[in-house]
Amino acid sequence: MIYRTVIRPLLFGIDPEVSHEVALTLLGGGGAVWSRLPGPGRDSLLETTVCGIRFPSPVGLAGGFDKSARALWAWPALGFGFVEVGTVTARPQPGNPRPRVFRLPEDEALINRLGFNSPGAEAVAERLAGMRQRRYPIPLAVNIGRSRAVDNEAAPEDYASSLDRLHAFADFLVINLSSPNTPGLRHLQMRAAAVPLLDRLAARNRALGEKPLFVKVAPDLTEEELEEIVSALDGRAHGLVAANTTVRRDGLRSAARDEAGGVSGRPLRDLATQVIRILRRLTRGSIPIIGVGGIFTAEDAYEKIKAGAALVELYTGFVYGGPCTPRRIAGRLRALLARDGFQSLPQAVGVEAR
Ligand SMILES: Cc1cc2nc3c(=O)[nH]c(=O)nc-3n(C[C@H](O)[C@H](O)[C@H](O)COP(=O)(O)O)c2cc1C
C-alpha cells in the first residue's frame, strides 16, 4: 500500500532509468542487512525441484532487473525464489542512447530499448566471485547475450567466452536469443543458427561441469519457428524461458506506445502464456519452461503454471507492484494450489496445456 501511494508516485515522477538506478542503489546498499533477513522460507506446497535444483518458491526475478549483480542480497530477502542476473555480454558495452526505457501507465507496461548495457562478463564475474564466498540462499541464474560489436557468425565464440567466465558462479544459465534491441539477435532462434551456437555452448558446458542451460525465446515466433527452436535444443540445452518482450503494439493507449523497443507487462501476458502452452505441447512436457510476461498477480502466475511453466518470473509486475510483490504472489499462489487440491506445485504444471 505504501509503495503504491507514496513510493511509486515518487519513483514514477522521475525518468524510468534514473528511478531504476535509485532502486538498485538502495537495494544494493543494504547488502549486510539484507543478507541477515530470512529468505523465502520452506513451504512444501511451493518448493519445487527443476533440473535437479531446489527452488524454495517458483516466483523469480526476471532477467534485466539486476543486470550486473548489484543487489543480490535483496532478492531472497524480498521473497524471490530465484534470480536471473544479466543479460551479461562478453565485452563491456554502453547499450543504446538514452532515453531508452518508457513507462506506459495506462497499459501497466514498459517499453525498453536498452540494448544490453553491460559492464561485461569479467566485471560481473568479479562481483559474483566476491558474493559467492558466502552461501546464497536461492538459485542464481546468469543470463548471457551477444555483444553488439559481434555479428551472428561470430556469436558462438562470443557467447562461449561469457559462458567460460560466468559458468562457475551460476546454478543454471540462460542463453538470451530473443532481445529485440540487438540487431539480428533474434535470427539466432532459427534452427540453422541455433544448432551450431548451442553445440558450441553444450560442449563448453560439458567441459566445465554440466549445468542446466535454458534458452530464452521471443513471444513473437510462429508455431513453426517455436518448433525449430525446440528441435535445436535436442540434448544441447535443458530448458526454455518464455518469453522476452514483444515487438507487437496491439491495443496500447499510453503516450509512449510508439517508442521503439520491446513491450513488457500486462499487454504481454496472454501472448506469453500462449507461447508457454505451445512449447509445453511441442516438448510433451519433457523440457522445463520458465514462464514470464505480464505476471502481476498470483492468478497470472497460476495461469502460466497450468499452461506448462515449472517456474515463473517477473519484471514489470515488480516495478508496478513494489517490494511486497514476490511474497504476495507466492502466498496467494499457495492458497490457489491448496484450493484446487494440489499437494505439490509440479502436479499443477501443464494441467491446462491443451
Ligand atoms: C527494462 C527492461 C530490461 C530488460 N532487460 C532484459 C535483459 O537484459 N535480458 C533479458 O533476457 N530480458 C530482459 N528483459 C525482459 C524481461 O526479463 C521479461 O522477459 C519481460 O519483461 C517480460 O516480463 P514482464 O512482463 O514481467 O516484465 C527486460 C525487460 C525490461 C522491462
Image (tube, rainbow, N blue to C red):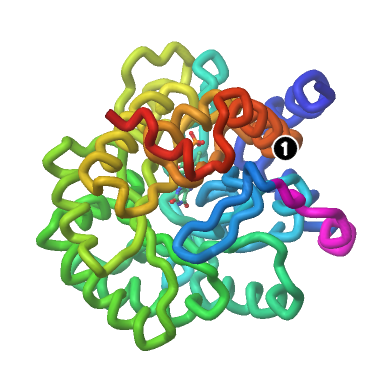
100 relative position to 152: left or right: right
Residue 261 appears in the picture as rendered: no
Residue bearing mark 1: 327
In front: 183, or 301?
301
Q: Residue at x 71, y 73 (%)?
A: 131
Q: Which residues are magenta?
A: 31-43
Q: Residue at x 36, y 88 (%)?
A: 207
Residue 169 quadrant = bottom right
Magenta stretch secondary structure, dominant: loop
Residue 277 magenta: no
Residue 283, given in percent of the width and then of the height, sits at 24, 48
Could you tell me the amino acid type at mark 1? Arg
**Which secondary structure lies at badge 1?**
helix
Residue 208, given in percent of the width and then of the height, sits at 42, 86
Residue 226, given in percent of the width and then of the height, sits at 20, 44
Residue 8, given in percent of the width and then of the height, sits at 74, 27
Q: Quadrant of the C terminus?
A: top left
Q: Residue at x 37, y 41 (%)?
A: 243
In front: 315, or 95?
315
Residue 34 magenta: yes
Q: Is residue 219 above or below residue 341?
A: below
